[in-house]
Amino acid sequence: MSMSSTPQTPDAGSEHLENEIELKEIAGLSQGQIVRGRFFRHKGAMTGLFLVVAVALLAFTSVGVGPIPGWWKYTGRTDPKGILNGGRPTGEHPFGQDELGRDMFAQVMKGIQTSLMVMVVIGLVACIMGVLVGSLSGYFRGKLDTALMRATDLVITVPTLVIGAVIGKLAGGVSAAVLAVALGLILWTSLARLVRGEFLTLREREFVDAAKVAGASTPRIIFKHILPNAVGVIIVSTTLLMSQAILLETALSYIGFGITPPEVSLGRLISEYQSAFATRPWLFWWPGLFIVLIALSINFIGDGLRDAFDPRQKRVPSVRKMERAEAKLEYKNPVVPPQLRTPGSSSGM
């Protein structure tokens, strides 16, 4: 009895080869190794990570941190030599000088330090609040879920910039750290909703039922069994939230409700030197350039983490790998020419 073979379309064959290559690459690897490998292969994420690390190292090593001095000879105070070359960028002052003769490179580096610190603190506070509210709401449901979600909706309904301006006016004059904590307490709402959705799904899984039967306590089930399975959503959302945080701090400082003197931030530098945009644009360009650079780099890192944690994201193999896979497939299943086929045989058999 002869068997008829169903011809595969080129698209189906290509998809089959891509699946074979992907399965071969991840064979024998743990989930953490797979995520790490996908992240390190993401060119945009690697570029963003390199830029963020490079900017942070430049900012913290050049002007130092606290009592630890840096390698840059100026500290942002007025240069005793006065204003050189009309304040334009020179070899002595690569970012130029302001109208008081202060070195702009030192000012911008201190602003980067403050903005990065505010960004990280806001991300951590928002992450803790979002995970706490979302996990409790999604696991216990019922009246607690209703109360927490209504409180979340209440925070969402008020524009973030308005709440941030009020909090910035109250806490901005205290210190940058206090302002960052206060802003983190209003930026957790989107993360809380995402975590709640993950918990609503995961709490119905078999491993949670098994943990309950084994006598595990509620905190152990939440933090030991469910939370590790939602870590992908948490990390990605927190990373993208940090990009939003640095832009919010910049906006608040620009309108005068954020970082206040004597502390320096990138947003405050833009606000302070906005009037010099037409006559001395270098005072405005450098803070703006680093804000855009940091925000874009964090977004690239977030995109890479999202693709790494999402199993539905597939990396298209290179042409060389596709050709090798096709050659191996043809070697295993050679196609017999029609004139050499015997009765009852089929192609590809």
Image: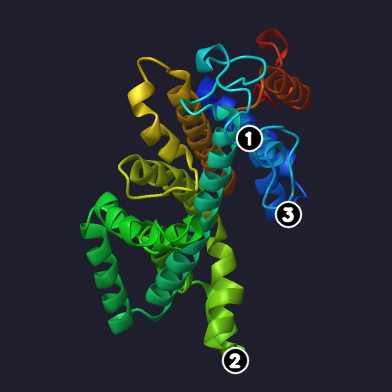
Which residue position holds label 1? 55
Position of 334 relative to 239 (above/below): above
The answer to the question of whether label 2 and label 3 lie on touching residues, with beta carbons closer than 8 A, is no
Q: Earlier in the sequence, mark 1 or mark 3?
A: 3
Near mark 1 (Cα within 10 A), the count class, few <14, some 14-19 or many ≥20, is some
Q: How many marks?
A: 3
Give the distance between the C-alpha atoms of the residues marked 2 and 3, in whole angstroms.
28 Å
Position of 147 relative to 324 (above/below): below
- Tell me the amino acid under the disc marked 2: Gly
Give the distance between the C-alpha atoms of the residues marked 1 and 2, in whole angstroms.
49 Å
Residue 86 drawn at (x, y percent): 51, 13
Q: Residue at x 48, y 37 (%)?
A: 295
Left or right, 63 with reference to 267: right
Which residue position holds label 2? 215
Q: Residue at x 34, y 56 (%)?
A: 168
Which residue position holds label 3? 30
> Considering the image in quadrants, where does the C terminus appear?
top right
- Tell me the amino acid under the disc marked 1: Val
Residue 272 drawn at (x, y percent): 39, 34
Near mark 3 (Cα within 10 A), the count class, few <14, some 14-19 or many ≥20, is few
**SS at circle 3:** loop
